[in-house]
Image (cartoon, coloured by chain):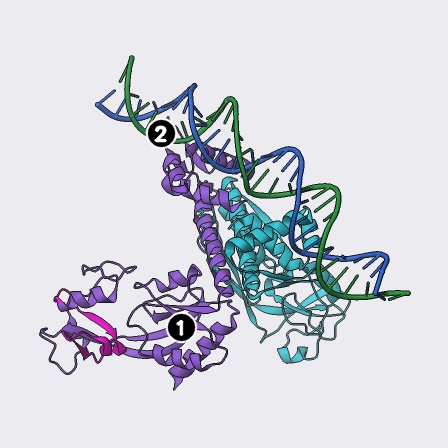
Chain colours: A cyan, B purple, C blue, D green
Amino acid sequence: MDSRELRYFVAVAEELHFGRAATRLGMAQPPLSRAIQHLERRMGVALLDRTSRSVALTAAGEVLLREGRRVLTALTAAERRTQRAGSARLVLAMKPVSDGDLLGEILADYAADPASIEVEVRICGIGEQSGLLRAGEADAALLRFPHDDPEGFAHEELLTERDVAVLPRTHRLADRGSLTMADLDGEQFPHWPGHPPNGGPLVRDTAQLMQLIALGRTIALLPGSARQHLRPDLVSVPVTDAPMTTMAIAWPEDSRSRPLAAFVEAAVKVARR
Amino acid sequence: MDSRELRYFVAVAEELHFGRAATRLGMAQPPLSRAIQHLERRMGVALLDRTSRSVALTAAGEVLLREGRRVLTALTAAERRTQRAGSARLVLAMKPVSDGDLLGEILADYAADPASIEVEVRICGIGEQSGLLRAGEADAALLRFPHDDPEGFAHEELLTERDVAVLPRTHRLADRGSLTMADLDGEQFPHWPGHPPNGGPLVRDTAQLMQLIALGRTIALLPGSARQHLRPDLVSVPVTDAPMTTMAIAWPEDSRSRPLAAFVEAAVKVARR
DNA sequence: GGCTCTCGATACCCTGGGGGTATGGATTCC
DNA sequence: GGAATCCATACCCCCAGGGTATCGAGAGCC
């Protein structure tokens, strides 16, 4: 099969409408209809049930949609990784305030390596790191367990620390020297993307989170190292029995890139000292 | 990128020779050269270092070869799975004599389900099951742990049994009621494909293995259930401390096929009783 | 019931790119 | 230095893939 046809099919299968799919693909509807017919003929299997009023997926079509999407993302990921293998630059994906204050040192340590290349730090939204890694847009990512999922990636744990509570300066618990999780019962926690809704406000980035905390709409448990970056109207309080979170660096399992290996090595070295 | 170009590139990267690659692809050499040039131009990265005498991969080319192969196999796997989703038939891959004598019952039990469809049992060589599964040629496979690797597949364990020694009837240990692993010290075990060579004869299928045992060239530890299928010139002897092996049924993690789910259910049900 | 609107399929045309052959030019080997 | 090898270039040709116009089948509306 040809990846062009696959792209066509995925577009139609997602839109369930030839006209819209054609627009999305930047082409006219008739050649799209024909291409799908070709595809079905060659594969010897019906992918779509169509009447003049509706388009629906057959069982085979559902399989091809699911698998096809994966193939297409793998294809563009391969493209990206290849392109970046040509450019002498590493791309590191991280969400803000999740570097455990180690990134500066890691970058400095790596830069000291005479064979080092430029490192672009790409700050992304919460939970987007693994997407960037999977799509081949980044060479490595800083993840935080258990929030992020290292599935399909190799990773190296760098730092484990206990979460602290981040509160508005005016919060009833803001003056306490330390807290327990029980003290936080009944508090409103934010709704992280990709997690089940808990009634709290949906938070997409850290600045937004900080703002919501300052407004008293929510409070958060953040890695201890986040303490250093708090706005003056927020305070952090240790929570003696808060969950531990682990920062790790992750990369595509089968990467053979020397610069990446050197960077990971630098990260581990800095974390161990 | 287009999968056709990717196929071209992979062929050249594997052959490191435009002429041979072109032959393999069933085309002439000049259009192949051009296609690769196009690809490099569009991606903005050199994939091959070529002189008039030699072709070598660049770093970027190595990345594309590795990732591209995977994409291409995923593509053909998607094609196969789609085609088979259209045909009302399940394909089960197994190597011979590894069904723990359960397969007959499983097939009967599944066939009793009114919604059941035809099941094709595909007997394959040793260690080939996961390849067939990965390539989308089979819907499910019988694996045996720890010999087979369920990586990337969902699986359900069906049966754990202790290996027995399979010996020629004339072997010095053939008359013993039971053995220990220590008794087998110094015996020549076969070399399984995909495992490191151990000096023993390479064995690709069970018939061959049985023949080699009968000839006294090797002996083997096989699942206890293999006992039933021994040739008359071979005997099996329990080994009290032999490793345990587990038979499992494995399938692509994200399969949504109803017939497959029903079949797995039947297999588990039979194994549990 | 007939008018209209929607939407996929069909008919037909046209262009560009992918493939072919012939040949050039560089390198290696005898 | 001549021959052989092998990738690149030059040039041609054809059809696959894309466009426009239109048909035909359902659905909804009055």
Label 1 vs 2, first from the N-terminus: 2
Q: Name the chain letter of the residue that bears numbered label 1.
A: B
Is B234 contained in the magenta span?
yes
The residue at 22%/72% (across/down) is: B221
Quadrant of the drawing holding the N terminus of chain B: top right
Q: Is residue A23 left or right of residue B129?
A: right
Q: Position of residue A113 (x, y in %)?
A: 46, 43
Residue furthest toward the bottom?
B273
Residue annotated with mark 1: B249
Mark 2 belongs to chain: B
- Residue identified by numbered label 2: B53
The image quadrant of residue B247 is bottom left
Residue positioned 66% across, 79% down in the render: A183
Crowd band around label 1 with a 10 angstrom C-alpha radius: few (<14), some (14–19), many (20+)? many
Numbered-mark total? 2
Q: Residues within 10 Å of mark 2 (few under 14, many from 20)?
A: few
Mark 1 element type: strand
Q: Position of residue A195 (x, y in %)?
A: 63, 69
Q: Amino acid at mark 1?
A: Ile
C1 w.r.t. A109: above or below: below
Q: Residue at x 70, y 76 (%)?
A: A187
Q: Which residues are magenta?
A: B215-240
Q: Amino acid at mark 2?
A: Arg
